[in-house]
Image: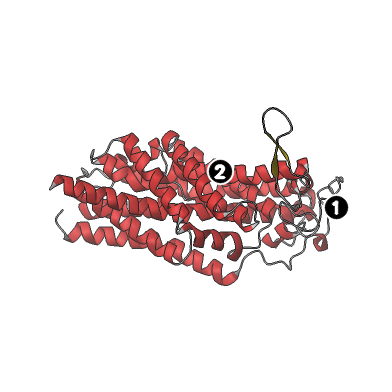
Amino acid sequence: MVEALLLVGLAVAVFVGFNIGGSSTGVAFGPAVGSNTISKVTAAGLMTVFALLGGWTVGREVVDTLGSDIVTTTFTLEISIGVLFFIGLALFLSNVAGVPASTSMTAVGAMAGLGLARGTLNWAEMGQIVTWWLVSPVLAFWVSAVVGRYYYPRLVEWFAVTQTEGALLELDRSGGLPKPVLGPNTTRREFVGTLSVVGIGCYMAFSAGASNVANAVAPLVGSESVGMNPAILLGGGAIGLGAFTIARRTMDTVGNDLTDLPLLAALVVAAVSSTIVTGLSALGVPASFVIIATMSIVGLGWGRATRTVTLSEARKGDAPEVSVGALAADAPDAPTVGGEGGTPEPTDSPAIGDEESEDIPRAADLFEPETTARVIFLQNVVPGIATVASFLLFRFVPL
């Protein structure tokens, strides 16, 4: 009987990891796939490797938090299966809708439902997690705002690259051993820019694994049904399975449907968000990458728009016309990898206060309203589904 239950538990854990892979791959590699920098198959392969690496290294702390710290209930195999089932069900609903959900919030919600039903919720631990959920988006906003106000125009000059025809790399077979060389049309600038796009996607996959592998396997580890190392391998493999299959829809949503965010801005958001999520994972705090990234987008756009006014002018009451659409200001003239406007010549960036509001167009709407509304709605509903379903199960069903 125990062996049969363990098989069911492993199957449910794989189901959860499968859905995590479907959700997180779109967030990590949607911009790179949307700009035709890499294919969906390549994105799935990279997601598998780096998510497993993140889970194997930093993610152990999050496994401990979810598996033993949020609730004081002793995890049995039956309880583990119930918690994992509702995590997987909620994430599956979001993936069917083609929207990446907050896997960490969903997992914590399912754990909280168990704790509330049994009266064993660790309120101190939940308070710490919720506090970081409130602080981390604010931190992402202000870090991104500083980048947008003081560094974004310079970053445009440094990283703006046009994608050329032909292969990025070729093998030179003229010597004794074949060696990779730049393609016939590839510039060094394009090569470095492309590597930056892919590298930041890998960094995001690492942070997703650090935070999210625990969501698939923590209850099994907490019940001592599976050891830490086999559990992380199982969770990482399941994430890879999801990356190669159902992630195609979320990559389309993030890369093409959700936003007209320029690729350079997407890279800044990815770097800021991944660093915050990885840091929180090292502290054992399950973090919501999607919410942190959203506030990073808003902060970057706000900072970019405020370049029209100096601090002294702002103190006098001069307010800039603020819009996250400011991120699209430089896109037509200075595209990042995949654009068609050509690589700009290096110029001196205008000083803060020298730019006019007309220099930062507001016409480009950063978000696709209908898709954005659907994403925001599901981001709140999915964790709620997991919490309520978990509470009802453990409150009224003796397990």
Instruction: In the rendered view, tell whether residue 64 sits above or below residue 238.
Output: above
Could you say where residue 266 lies in the image, as x and y percent from the top left?
A: 64, 52
Could you say where residue 124 lies in the image, as x and y percent from the top left?
A: 34, 43
- Provide the secondary structure element on which disc 1 rests: loop
Instruction: In the rendered view, tell whether residue 77 sits above or below residue 378.
Output: above
Q: Name the residue under label 2.
A: 202
Decide which of tag 1 and tag 2 comes sooner along the chain.
Answer: 2
Q: Mark 1 points at which residue?
A: 354
Question: In the image, 97: left or right of 79?
Answer: right
Front in this rendered view, residue 272 or 213: 213
Mark 2 closeness class: few <14, some 14–19, many ≥20 residues within 10 Å: many
Question: In the image, 167: left or right of 47?
Answer: right
Question: Looking at the image, can residue 106 be seen?
Answer: yes
Amino acid beneath label 1: Asp
Q: Image quadrant of residue 96?
A: bottom left
Could you say where residue 197 lies in the image, as x and y percent from the top left?
A: 64, 46
Q: Do the residues labelled 1 and 2 touch (CB within 8 Å)?
A: no
Q: Which of marks 1 and 2 is in front?
A: 2
